[in-house]
Amino acid sequence: MGVIANANSGIGAGVRRVNRLVRALERRGIASVVGWTPDDREALVRQAGPGSGCRSLVAVGGDGTVGALLNDRPAVPITVLPAGTENLFARHFGIPGDPERVAELIAEGRALPLDLGEARGRRFALMAGVGFDAEVVTRHHLARLGRARRVRPTSRVAYVEPVLRASFGYGFPPLSIRVEDPGPPELLSGSIAIVFNLPRYALGLPIAPEAREDDGLLDLVVFRDPGPMAALHYLWLVFRGRHLGRPDVWHRRIRRISVSAEVPVPVQLDGDPGGVIDPDAPDPWTVRVLPRASSVIVPRSYGASRPKVAS
């Protein structure tokens, strides 16, 4: 099997965690190959094709490492040894941070189907955001780039400054969101739009609490009112679990949407910058669901009490 590690964790504790995972897999009779670079990752994904005997690919890192692996379109199940800041993917599935326990669940091999979202050809497992939250993500990412243009490690505290700067510097331009599911189209407008595949946002915020990874749908949440005070108010409502059902917050399940704006608006995918919505682009910026596009190895305890979704 392949072990894909975040190059930013390639020293000190990071390499020790990878080595612990490799040894734990060996004790269970599972040989593994470790890759530290994007080229290594792409090579491991190519080698793990049908008939290769590879049972899984494991991402050692945070949600960005998981997203990079999924965008290489692996043909075998994936899992993760969480080593990032938020680890929303691992937390959702209850995947532990102990290499020994991750090796055990890989050996058990309980793989479940995983829907993905896709925006302009790029896949995401967690969410895609348009507007203020993407502005914060973009500012945070630029602050992490050192002189060598290498992304440095981060923490939750590091988001404080980009949130404050974005609050005063972002214009909150209006967004037009067109739902393009089968049936009559629906047009919504707002200042922030987020499409979820899994239910939680950064800090564990349950913005789309009913979203699930295997229903063949994505959850669209649109916050209508613009401005920093409105954004803070919405954040407070989310913390209290009282945002859904309000007349200024729209939520619905979707298969495909397109988003447009009269000025360039930033986009984030799984907490990383995803470019901008260009009002002059020949094609609209679209998001669609990819039902069961991948699969994920999870602990046996995951989903024991959840109702099943019909195929």
Image (tube, helix red, strand yellow):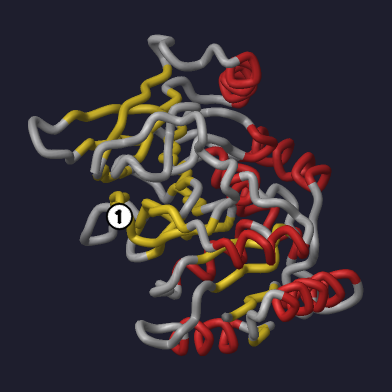
Q: Secondary structure at mark 1?
A: strand
Horizontal placement of 174 versus 229: left or right? left
Q: Residue at x 62, y 68 (%)?
A: 59
Observer able to see residue 136: no
Which corner quadrant holds the N terminus?
A: bottom right
Q: Nearer the viewer, residue 162 or 92?
A: 92
Q: Residue furthest right?
A: 12
User: Is 76 rendered above or below residue 159?
Assistant: below
- On the image, the x and y values in percent for residue 242 come to 54, 12
Which corner quadrant holds the C terminus?
A: top left
Q: Residue at x 53, y 69 (%)?
A: 68
User: Is 305 rendered above or below residue 275?
Assistant: above
Q: Amino acid at mark 1?
A: Leu
Q: Residue at x 25, y 53 (%)?
A: 284
Q: Nearer the viewer, residue 303 or 71?
A: 303
Observer able to see residue 89: yes
**Could you say which quadrant of the image residue 308 lies in?**
top left
Q: Which residue is mark 1?
A: 290
Horizontal placement of 181 versus 107: left or right? left
Q: How many marks?
A: 1
User: Is 160 rendered above or below residue 290?
Assistant: above
